[in-house]
Image (cartoon, helix red, strand yellow):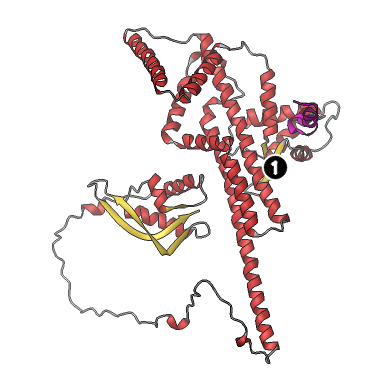
Amino acid sequence: MTYEYISQLLKNHTSIRLLKADNAPLIISFLFSTFKEEFSNQEEGGILEKELSSRLSDILYVLNEPNKTYPKPPTEYLTDWSNAGFLRKYPGKTDEFIYELTPATELIFKWIDSLEKREFIGTESRLKYLFERMQRLVGKTQMNASERLAQLEAQKRILEQDIEDIKAGKLEMLNERQIKEEYFLIEDTAKSLLADFREVEQNFRDLNRNFRRQIITTSQSKGEVLSDLFEQQDFLTQTDQGKSFTAFWEFLLSQSKQVELEKLIELMLNIPVVQKMRNDNFRMELLRNSLIEAGDRTNKTTNSLWNQLRKYLEHKSFFENKRIHEQIDEGLKLIFEHPEIDFTRLPALEVEDIIRINLICDRPLFSPPEQVKFKKQQLQEGQASGDNELLYEQFEINIPKLKENIRQLLRYQPQVSLQELIKVHPIEKGVAEVVAYLDIATKNGERHSVSTSEQEEIQICNSQTGQIFKVKIPKIIFS
């Protein structure tokens, strides 16, 4: 912490500028009460401008009595705070803007919360947590197999002793003080985790913004721009933060872990001591949904980057094709303007690859369909010899579930084939489910693609007989 660093920090850091703002009490109290208390259970994490402006108008009306301390209209204050970096403002699905908290504002909330005087400072739980983390760090990095075995044997003896005590009717229970310490530690960790997500999301958003700026201002070739983008993206995903987020998201997407987390939260909140000390500013029962929503927003930011990349490539390809046609027209114009020149005797251009020409004459001629003539014969009703019970054993393909399977994998990668998809989500309802995936791909041709020139082999297992069938279909790519 040098003098120069602190000086620059006080001038430029958004969180410190928020603390030094003239309207800091209004900004911090209003944003906290709105985003963390009243609208804390919002699924999208943002608030519409109309709702936010209405609430700010009510607050300003109270504060402006009797002196008009805040003369500007609410929307102007919101715009000022967005320009200063205290709020993020972006257009929603409709024409109305949406506001979200920025990492700098989340950091201020976290810091102010740490200043509040607590009922007591829990040290035992944090010391045990520190001790357990150190044991895990040392144990998992210990290369000596005998020492690791000795540690595991010691843990085994402790577990066996606990089992014997429980069988003997000796149940070790946490007292009220220990319960409070543990819950405070859990709550602090959950708050920090949710606040840190804003910073992770902001890092990906900065990469997205820099890429758009580079597209507009650069004179580099398409290959150089893409190379820079992939280098930045690889750097971000290969950092400790990026790897940690990927591991977190894979862990949270596990259905069994989600069920376990929900059950643990429910059991914890039913503890009488916890019910008495719960903080109204933090909804622990919404933790799972909040974590999923925060991680999903980060993934959507990454997907936005790939959408910008796709648009950039389409834009570049359009102008490159246009330039090729212009050059062809210029060549034809030269030929007509200079008939005295024999252009056929000019040096030939050697093409490394074979030029594939598809002539109209290569197409087959029209063949009229064969007409089938039926004899006029009286048909008599016969006796059914087969079992028609199978006609009533129909089932329905859950299309929304198949689309959700596709969306889950696209959160980790820009494209996924049907072959890769069924490795994670196996086919459960036979060929009909494969046809449903094909239908999804063809109906959304702008994003997905079906390549008739390539084929892939899909294995389908009969759940009743265990027999495996193989089906060849056109290659399907979801993106």
Q: Which residue occupies 47% across, 10% down?
A: 174
Label 1 packing within 10 angstroms: few (<14), some (14-19), many (20+)? many
The image position of residue 348, as x and y in percent, is 59, 81
What residue does disc 1 label? 89
- Residue that sits furthest to the right in the current view: 67
* Magenta residues, start to end: 1-18
The image position of residue 281, as x and y in percent, is 62, 24
Q: Which residue occupies 37% across, 15% down?
A: 159
Residue 57 lies left or right of residue 331; in this view the side is: right
- Residue that sits furthest to the bottom in the current view: 340
Amino acid carrying label 1: it is Lys
| Residue 321 inside the magenta-drawn segment | no
Q: Is residue 452 above or below residue 6?
A: below
The secondary structure that most of the magenta stretch takes on is helix
Depth check: 192 or 392 in front? 192
Q: Which residue occupies 47% across, 81% down?
A: 360
The image position of residue 319, as x and y in percent, is 65, 66
- Per the image, label 1 sits on a secondary structure element best described as strand
